[in-house]
Image (cartoon, helix red, strand yellow):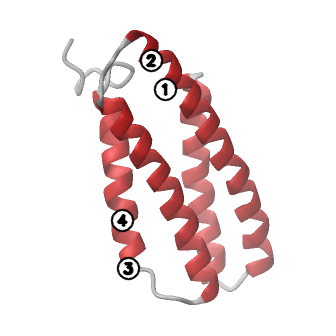
């Protein structure tokens, strides 16, 4: 399940960048297609994330997992809000800031927790 989760969010970040570039270049029809695919990936991220969360909470009772889930949902929300606001031509600096903070906290928590990367996790 962990690999499906990582694959989902990695693909989502790539598709977000592609959609963002398409919107900035004025290709709204192509951007709409990528945006729909991106929304399917959001669902995959949320479903696999919840499955991982439930599996981990049965074994490890670390409150940092709650924080990671909250900021993960916030990250997905900011990705979607950015694309919607760019499509409508509205201002986005606040959403970019929130995205960077939310993504940073989410990635750090994901790497620092026991299922993460060894340099961040001290057993």
Query: Where does the C terminus fall, quadrant-wise?
Result: top left
**Disc 1 vs disc 2: Cβ atoms closer than 8 Å?**
yes
Q: Compared with residue 45, is residue 30 higher up or lower down, i.e. above or below?
A: below
Q: How far is mark 1 from mark 4, CA to CA?
A: 23 Å
- Compare marks 2 and 4 and give the one earlier in the sequence: 2
Q: Circle 2 sits in a helix, a strand or a loop, which is it?
A: helix
Does 68 sit left or right of 19 as displayed? left
Circle 3 residues within 10 Å: few <14, some 14–19, many ≥20: few
- Compare marks 1 and 4 and give the one earlier in the sequence: 1
The circle drawn on residue 53 is 1
Q: Residue at x 33, y 25 (%)?
A: 117
Q: On the image, numbered disc 3 is attached to which residue? A: 93
Tell me the mark number nearer the camera, choosing from 1 and 4: 1
The image quadrant of residue 59 is top left
Q: Circle 1 sits in a helix, a strand or a loop, which is it?
A: helix
Q: Residue at x 24, y 22 (%)?
A: 121
Q: On the image, numbered disc 4 is attached to which residue? A: 98
């Amino acid at each position: 399940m962990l690999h499906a989760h990582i694959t989902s969010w990695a693909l989502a970040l790539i598709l977000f960048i592609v959609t963002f570039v398409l919107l900035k270049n004025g290709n709204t029809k192509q951007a709409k297609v990528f945006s729909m695919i991106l929304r399917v990936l959001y669902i995959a991220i949320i479903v696999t994330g919840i499955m991982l969360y439930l599996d981990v909470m049965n074994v490890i009772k670390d409150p940092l997992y709650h924080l990671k889930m909250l900021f993960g949902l916030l990250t997905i929300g900011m990705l979607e809000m950015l694309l919607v606001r760019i499509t409508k031509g509205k201002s986005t600096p606040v959403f970019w800031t929130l995205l960077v903070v939310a993504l940073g906290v989410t990635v750090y928590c994901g790497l620092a927790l026991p299922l993460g990367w060894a340099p961040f996790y001290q057993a």
